[in-house]
Image (spheres, helix red, strand yellow):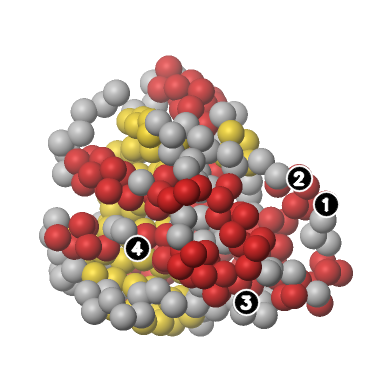
Amino acid sequence: MFPAGVSSIRARDVTLESGLVLHIAESGERGSAPVLLVHGWGASIFMWRGWFAPLAAAGRHVIAVDLPGHGLSEKPVEPSAYRLASLVSAVRELIELEQLAPVDVVAQSMGGTVALALATAANSPVRRLVLVNPAAFGRVRLQRLARLVSPSRVDSVLPHLVPRWIVARAHRMVYGDPSRITSHDVDEYWAPSQFPDFARAMRMLVHEFSWARLPVDEMAKRIGPLATRMMLVLGTRDRLVRDAAPYAEALRAAGTPLEVKIIAGGGHAVNEERADEVVRLTLDFLDGRLGDT
């Protein structure tokens, strides 16, 4: 599994004060300006494979984390571990333990909701924030169906319900251009899904995580006063998080200081699908070179 065989990326486990074990991968020099990469539901640090080298070359200390339940991180059995507050607490603990604050954060989909909650919390360690198709800004497709078909009684058979073809089909849904996906990409996503507790963790996230979008006025009040600068990156072919663009424009109209960048043809995982393009935008934003559009 990634990053095996990549000498420039160091992978290790980190045990938080709470006892939770998270798996991280890092590149670049410790002590350089840190950038924390946070994936979305069902993904892992592999999502950021195209980000390590360019961010490190730009003088950044790059850290990507497998969120609880994902990748090689611990997969708690308690449903409460998959609530928004618990995930925010885990990420904050990681930042404190690794002494990353103040840290720039780039987060996608569900990870974007986690990062946004961390940025708006008291004594936030976040310096600048890049949100890629964040679930908190849109209507999450298929969530209602997923809730209906995943009652707790199916936990005993869930480990047998993640064949490779399902992973391949799901991966195609998050790309604007599925032809970019390779067989190796599918294998990397399929591998962590074969851990016995993975499917149960994904089911509990569907039920326990906060997927609802706040009304525009409430979100504007929450992020309007922030000192943290924020950039939103949206793919026009996002099939999973709908209506994020008009929501973002409504926030801007309400006076929220939010930079919005649209990637034509990009899918839900545009940070993975079009890594070079989104990395350039991110570095320009983090370094203060990017004008608002």
Most extreme residue toward the top is 253
User: Residue at 36% across / 46% down in the picture?
Assistant: 274
Instruction: Inspect the image, locate mark 4, and give the three-letter code of the amino acid beneath it.
Output: Arg
Q: Which residue does the numbered mark 3 point to in the structure image?
A: 194
Q: Which residue does the numbered mark 4 point to in the structure image?
A: 49
> In what element is the residue under mark 2?
helix
Q: Which residue does the numbered mark 2 point to in the structure image?
A: 144
Spatial separation of the CA atoms under disc 2 and disc 4: 31 Å
User: Residue 148's mark?
Assistant: 1
Instruction: Inspect the image, locate mark 3, and give the three-letter code of the amino acid beneath it.
Output: Gln
* Nearer-the-camera pick, 282 or 76: 282
User: Residue at 56% across / 50% down in the picture?
Assistant: 172
* Nearer-the-camera pick, 259 or 54: 54
Which of pointers 2 and 4 lies earlier in the amino acid sequence? 4
Instruction: Inspect the image, locate mark 1, and give the three-letter code of the amino acid beneath it.
Output: Leu
Q: Is residue 188 left or right of residue 158?
A: left
Residue 13 visible in the current orientation: yes
Which of pointers 4 and 3 lies earlier in the amino acid sequence? 4
